[in-house]
Image (cartoon, grey):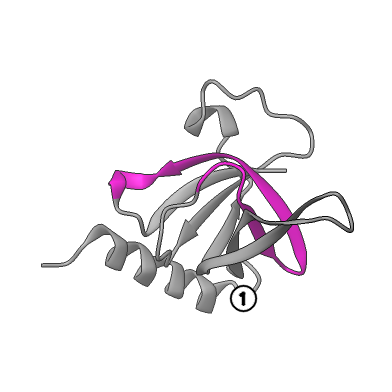
């Protein structure tokens, strides 16, 4: 049986072939509080990779259509992610094109854990 995630991955792969700059490689990171460092009198954060994925910046759909409770600012973007190994979480970092974006909202599509919409800034 074909899953929704497999269909999404095939669609994104075909889009990447048709429009070469439409699909970008991305990676998710979670910042985890590390051990206490007496030298800096604080905790050191550790960045844990949560996997790579494909990302498409959605410039057509308004962010409010996906996240109706979010009042989007001028620097926020709606991004469709596929090929995930874990569903993204608010507060995580999405690294795409050499730039880090903070995930402000996340929606696991069909609770699949492998495709999601995120709002980032």
Residue sticking out furthest to the front? 38
**Picture residue at 17% right of the left edge, 67% below the top:** 2
Residue 102 left/right relative to 80: right
Residue 58 left/right relative to 110: right
Residue 15 left/right relative to 94: left
Instruction: Decide whether residue 50 is among the magenta residues.
Output: no
Position of the N terminus, as image quadrant, is bottom left
Give the answer, above or below, for where 117 lies relative to 105: below
**Picture residue at 43% right of the left edge, 64% below the top:** 84
Residue 52 pos. (x, y %): 52, 71
- The magenta region covers 89-111
What predominant SS class does the magenta segment belong to? strand
**Disc 1 target residue:** 20
**Picture residue at 30% right of the left edge, 46% below the top:** 111
Instruction: Decide whether residue 105 is among the magenta residues.
Output: yes
Tell me which corner region of the image, top left, top right, bottom left or bottom right, holds residue 47.
Answer: bottom right
């Amino acid at each position: 049986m074909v899953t929704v995630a497999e269909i999404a991955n095939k669609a994104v792969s075909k889009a990447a072939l048709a429009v070469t700059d439409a699909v970008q490689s991305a990676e998710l990171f979670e910042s985890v509080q590390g051990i206490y460092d007496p030298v800096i009198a604080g905790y050191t954060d550790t960045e844990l990779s949560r996997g790579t994925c494909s990302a498409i910046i959605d410039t057509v759909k308004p962010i409010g259509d996906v996240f109706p409770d979010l009042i989007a600012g001028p620097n926020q973007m709606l991004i469709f992610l596929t090929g995930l190994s874990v569903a993204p979480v608010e507060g995580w970092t999405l690294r795409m094109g050499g730039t880090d974006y903070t995930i402000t909202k996340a929606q696991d599509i069909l609770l699949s854990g492998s495709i999601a919409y995120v709002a980032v800034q």
